[in-house]
Image (tube, rainbow, N blue to C red):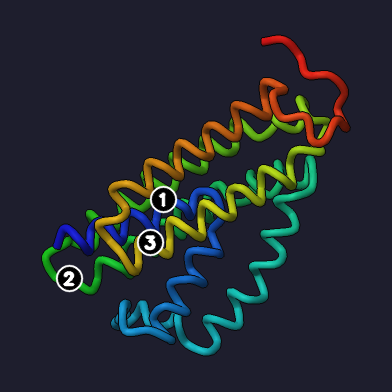
Amino acid sequence: MIATFLSGLGAAAPAGLNATLPLLILALADRLTGAVNLGQPYDLISSTWGIIVLLFILPIELIADKIARVDHANDLLHTAIRPAAGALLMMAVTSQNDHINPVVSLILGLLFAGAVHWYKTTNRPAVTIATKGLGNPVLSMAEDGAVIVCTIVALFIPYGVIVVLPLCAWFVHWSYKRFKTGEVRLGGLLGPARRA
C-alpha cells in the first residue's frame, strides 16, 4: 500500500509542470512492462488511441512551454488541466491497490499537481523578465528532465520517490531561483551578472 501510494504521488506531482509527459510515461509503462497494470477504466490511457492522443498533444505542450509569453498563456490554459492530470495519474496508479480510496487519491493528486502548477505559473514570468525570455526554453528543458526522472522512478522504484521527489523539487526551485536572480547568464548573452 505504501509503495503504491508513493508511486502515485511521484507520478502525480510532476503533472504540475507538464500534464502530458507523466501520462505518456504511465501509458508506455503499462503497455510495455509488467511494472504497471492499469485496470478499467484507467487502461484507456494505455490504449492505442490513448497513446496516439498523448503523442499528438505532447509536442504542442513541449513547444509552447519553451516560448516566452506563450508559455505563460500555456500555463494559464493548463490551470485546470495539470491538476486534473495529477488526479488522474494518482487515481490510475493507486487503483492497483484496493486499500486506497479513489476519492482520497483524486484529492491528493489535485493538491500536489495543483501546488506544483501554482509554483510554476507564479514564478515563470519573473524568469522571462530576468532573462529577456532566453531562459524560458532552458528552464523548460530542466523541468522536462525532472518530470521524466521523477515519473520513471515513481513507476519502477516506488520507494525511490522518498529521495527523488524532494530532489526534483529542490532542483526545480534552485533553477528558478538562479534564473530569477540573474545567476545564470546563458553564455554571456545577457551581459554581466547582477549583484545579489
Residue 44 sits above or below residue 58 on the image: below
Left or right: where 16 falls relative to 139 = left
Left or right: where 3 falls relative to 29 = left
- Report which residue position mark 3 lands on: 153
Mark 3 to mark 2 CA distance (whole Å): 18 Å
Instruction: Describe the element under mark 3 as helix, strand or loop.
Output: helix
Q: Give the quadrant of residue 55.
A: bottom right
- Residue 33, horizontal then vertical, whole percent: 38, 84
Residue 160 sits above or below residue 139 on the image: below
Q: Give the quadrant of residue 89.
A: bottom left
- Report which residue position mark 1 lands on: 13
Q: Residue flagged by tag 3: what amino acid is it?
A: Val
Residue 126 visible within the image: no
Q: Which residue is found at the position 31% from the left and 84% from the top?
A: 34
Q: Residue flagged by tag 1: what amino acid is it?
A: Ala
Q: Which residue is found at the position 60% from the left and 78% from the top?
A: 53
Q: Which residue is found at the position 74% from the left and 54% from the top?
A: 64
Residue 97's tag is 2
Mark 2 to mark 1 CA distance (whole Å): 19 Å
Residue that protrudes farthest toward the top in the picture: 195
Residue that protrudes farthest toward the left in the picture: 99
